[in-house]
Image (tube, helix red, strand yellow):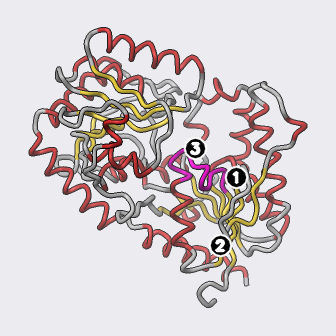
Amino acid sequence: MAPRDLTVGILSREYPPEVYGGAGIHVENLVRFLQRHVQVAVHCFGNARVADEVVGSYQPWDALEGSAAYLSALRTLSVDLAMAARLDRVQLAHSHTWYANFAGHLAKLTYRIPHVMTSHSLEPLRPWKAEQLAGGYALSCFAERTSIESADAVIAVSRGMKQDILRCYPTVSAERVHVIHNGIDPNEVQPDLGTNVLEANGIDPKLPYAVFVGRITKQKGIIHLLEAARELVPGTQLVLCAGEPDTAELAQEVRRLVGELRATGRTVIWIERMIGRAALAQVLSHARVFVCPSVYEPFGIVNLEAMACGVPVVASAVGGIPEIIVPGETGTLVHFENDGSPFGTPADREKFAHDLASAINDLLESPERAQRYGQAGRARVIEHFSWASIAEKTAELYRQLVDGRS
């Protein structure tokens, strides 16, 4: 099959300008580089887009309006139905996250085309979502399980993710799971030595700071970082680029902990809105250390973003993170042991917070080493996590599947 004679439907909840997480960043960049190899037809949730590659954007059914938590899952499935109805002209469907997986599964059945799904996370490993979705969590699990067990190929964004897939879904054969790492464009994400964004958000560029970037979810471990912050070196700024809480209760807990830290004289700068990528690059570039305290993280693109900006990373050793961070070279990995509960709670919460604080302090007090780690981190990103390479591997997988059916 000649280059670009294959039309692929990319199915995603997120697509620019409506991008709020790592999966959306992944899809945005994958599409950009995939277009060198195949014809891409993007189908996404939300408002109409002007980009030429977007052939469909979809809103949930009006009949499903309401505030009940489970309705959000039903609204998602209504979009999947509408999306699947317009995939008759593609030769392969590639879905991202449970939000779009079911559309890919329906396309496979309806049009007899291959379905590839990328697993950015797994619903069985995020049981705290039951608090957010209520009965809708059973629907999200159903959509993911049905799709992953019948997909022609599953892309895992890390080796750790592949292990999780095979453990959670034992009927999926290892041969159907292909590890293709997440990536980054280091020409787009790079150090920014300006200070206008810092000053506009109350960050003092002359003082060292640790920074967290992520949604306010139990998965991202922000609560454990705030507990660790009690032990940070005095005079340290803690910068939180954190918004979109999963629940009102979690938002309230974060607000309480931030208030307690400020009451003891700690400097906590909380940017509660999502900031643009260029602004985020500046915030990252001036940090002494980036912190990723996740209790569950299949990969973690944000770690690559920090490294691309020349910042060392302190992260919990979970999921795919150890495939990104090289301890003693680009950052520090902090051991995380689950207490056996389904909610990702540390076996020893105080010890995890203490170990996290110690690793952060070690780099806060060693600016030369932090700089060395940061330089090595950017070099590692350039060498190992190129979107051009990732798109090429993905396009080759498409061709193997389509050629295998012809």
Mark 2 is on which residue type?
Answer: Val
| Label 3 crowd bin: few (<14), some (14–19), many (20+), radius 10 Å | many
In the figure, is residue 267 to the left or right of 92? left
Cβ atoms under marks 1 and 2 closer than 8 Å: no
Q: Residue furthest bottom?
A: 2
Residue pictured at 43% horizontal, 31% vertical: 271
Expressed as whole percent of the image width and height from the top left, the position of residue 37 reads 56, 80
Task: Using the numbered discs, state the Cα–Cα distance from disc 3 to disc 1 in whole angstroms.
Answer: 13 Å
Residue pictured at 80% horizontal, 38% vertical: 74
Q: Which residue is mark 1?
A: 100
- Answer whether residue 13 is magenta in the image: yes
Q: Which residue is mark 3?
A: 122
Dot 1 falls on a residue whose secondary structure is helix
User: For the residues carrying marks 1 and 2, which lies nearer the camera in this image?
Assistant: 2
Dot 2 falls on a residue whose secondary structure is strand
Judging depth in this view, the residue of 266 and 21 nearest the camera is: 266
Mark 3 is on which residue type?
Answer: Leu
Judging depth in this view, the residue of 149 and 396 nearest the camera is: 396
In the figure, is residue 306 to the left or right of 369? right
Q: Which residue is mark 2?
A: 40
- Answer whether residue 67 is magenta in the image: no
